[in-house]
Amino acid sequence: MKNKLIINPSDQFINKNDDFENIFVDRFIYDQCKLKKSTDKYFSSRLDYSYRIENFNLSNKLFYEILECIKLELNSIFEKNLNQKFFEIVIGAWLRKFIQQFILKYKNIIESKKKFNINYTTIYDTTNFNFFTTETHTIQHATINNLWNTCIYSYILKNCFLDIELNIIKLSEKKFDDTELLSNRKSSDNKKNFKQNIINLWFYLTNLIPNNSNIFLYNMGFEFFNEKKIDLSFGQLPRVYPLNFNFNYSNFDCKLRKNLNFEKFVKLDNQNYDKHFVKIFNLIIRILNKSLPITIVEDFKNLIEYSEKLNFPKNPKAICTSYAFESIEPFKYYVALRKFYNPKIKYFVYQHGGSYITRLDNSYNNECNTCDYFITWGDKTDTTKKNNLKFVNFKLLNKKYFKNKKVDKFLILMRSSGYNAVPYDRYSEGLNQLDLTVKLCKKFSSDLVKKTVIRAHYASKNRIEDQLKDLDRFKIDYSEQNYFDAINSAKLILFNHDSTGILEMFALNKPTLCLWEKGYQHQNKFVVQDYELLKNSKIFFDDQEKLYQHLLDIWNDPLKWWNNDNVQNNLKKFVNLYTQLPDKNFNLKFKRIIENRL
C-alpha cells in the first residue's frame, strides 16, 4: 500500500480512501484531525539529548551565517553601517526561532520519507504566501498556526525534490495574521485609576527634565517603589517608563521587499558543510525577503527614529532588564543603537524564570548571547557562557509568596501547552509529561481525589481536554484562582515539568514533588548531578508508580518527610545553586553588581 504524507489536519489534505495510508508529519497535526482511519499513523521525531543538541548546534551555525547576510543586505538597502551585534539584538530572537522551525520541519519530512517510504502528498502553492510576522515575538504564535506551519512544510516539500508526487492546491491567504497578538500597537484602552493617574503625572513631570541617568533600569520585574529606591541609590532621578507603546505598524510592502536580494548568498553544496546545512540555509535565504518581520524592513527607519525620541537615557553606562529583550521592539532598537554608538555601555539581563541554567534550550536563547552580563538566581552558572553573574531570585522579594493558609489540599501544577518554537517536538514532550500525570492521578483514591486540584494553564483549556477526559473526577482549575492563593493554600504541591515554580517553592521551603520523563534529556549535562540531589531526597521522580507510593507514605504528614535532615540538606544545596532568597540588603548588593562591571 502507498503512503501519503499529511501536513495539515483539514479534509482537503487527507486521503479518505483505502488506497493510501495517511502518515501525519507530526503529532501536533495528527491530534487535530477529527476523522482518522484506523490505519493512520504519525511520525514521532526524537526527543533525546543528542538530537536536541545536534539541532541547536546546527541552528546556531545557520544563525550567524544568515544574520551576516541580513546585516549586509539591510545596511545596503537602508544606507547604514550597523554592526552584527545591532541586528542580533533587534532580530536575533525571531531569526533563531525561524531557523529552528526549518530544521525541525525539514528533518521531519526527511525522516518520515525514510521510515514510511512516502509516495504522495498534498501541499499549498506558496508562491504568493508571505511568511513574515509583524513583530519578532509573534513567530511563537505562528508555530501553532496551521496555515503558517502548512506553508513552511509545503515550501520545503516543493523545493527539496524528494521523489514524492505533489498534489498542489491553491491558497487564497497571503499571510499569517498576527494583528491581535501584537505587543506594541495603537490601543483605545484608556482605563485609569488613582494610582495610575499619580504614576502618569510623575511620568509627565520627569519627562520635562533631560534624562541623564547613568543606570537605565527597564522592565526589571521589581516592586515599583523598590525599583525607585534603587534609582535613588544610583544618585539619579526615579523615573517611570512605558512598558507598552502605541506604535502604528506599516503594511507589508512588496515593492520594498523586491529590493532585498538574498539570492546572491545562496551556497553551493560541498563537503565542507554539515549534510543538512546547505539545504536548510538555501531554503531560508530564498524566502528571507518575504519572511523578515515588518519591524526590521518596513519599519526599520521608523523604529530607529521612534526609539531615538523616547525619553530614555541618552548616554547611560549600563542598561538593565529582566523582560524587555524580546517583545518590546522600541526598547530593543534603543539598546542596539546605544551599543552601536558606544560599545563600552554594559547590557545586563537578569534571569526572570527557571530553567535558564538548567535547560539546554536556554543556553541558545538570544538574550543570553547578546547581553554583556547575565545575572543568575544562584551560584550555578552556565558553563557554556562567560558572562554569568551569581546573585539571588528577585521574584521572592514579593511578599505574596509568604501568606500560608492551612488547607488540606494537594495541588498539581501542569505545564502550559505553549508553542512549538524549538528545533524538537515540544508538543510531544508536553503530551508525554501530561500522560505521566494522568497515569498518576488515575491511581488516586476517592478521598485523595476530593483533596486534589489540578491547575492547568488558561491557554490550554481547549487544547488538552482530550488528554484530561479520564480525570473527570478531579477539580481542574484553568488558572481561574489567583496563583498565590493556590500555592499558599496547598499542603503539598506537585509540578509535572521543570519550572520556575519549582525553584520558588524550594526557596520558600514548601513541600514539593516533581515528575517528568526519564533521561534528563532536556537538561544541560553540567546540572544532572544537582538533580540527583532531588532524586535521592524523593522530591523528583521519573516513575509515576514510585511517586504514587511515596505520596501515600507522606500524605498524612508531608512535613515529617520534608523536614528530615537528608531532604533539608540536599534542598539547601540545590537552593544555593539555583534560587537563593534575597535578603534585606538586596538593593545594595544589586547596585554593587552593576557598578563593579562599569
Image (tube, grey):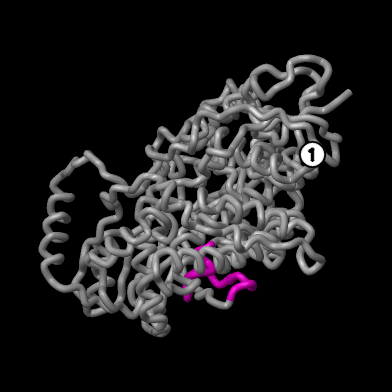
Residue 358: x, y in percent? 62, 61
Magenta part of the chain:
366-385
Q: Residue at x 33, y 72 (%)?
A: 587
- Looking at numbered disc 1 in the image, what kind of residue is underneath it? Ser
From this viewpoint, is residue 413 visible?
no
Q: Quadrant of the N terminus?
A: top right
Residue 184: x, y in percent? 33, 49
Residue 82 appears in which quarter of the rendering? bottom left
Residue 25 appears in which quarter of the rendering? top right
Residue 312: x, y in percent? 26, 68
Residue 158: x, y in percent? 69, 40
Q: Which residue is mark 1?
A: 112
Prevailing SS of the magenta stretch: loop
287 in relation to 77, above or below: above
Residue 373 on the magenta span: yes
Residue 406 appears in which quarter of the rendering? top left
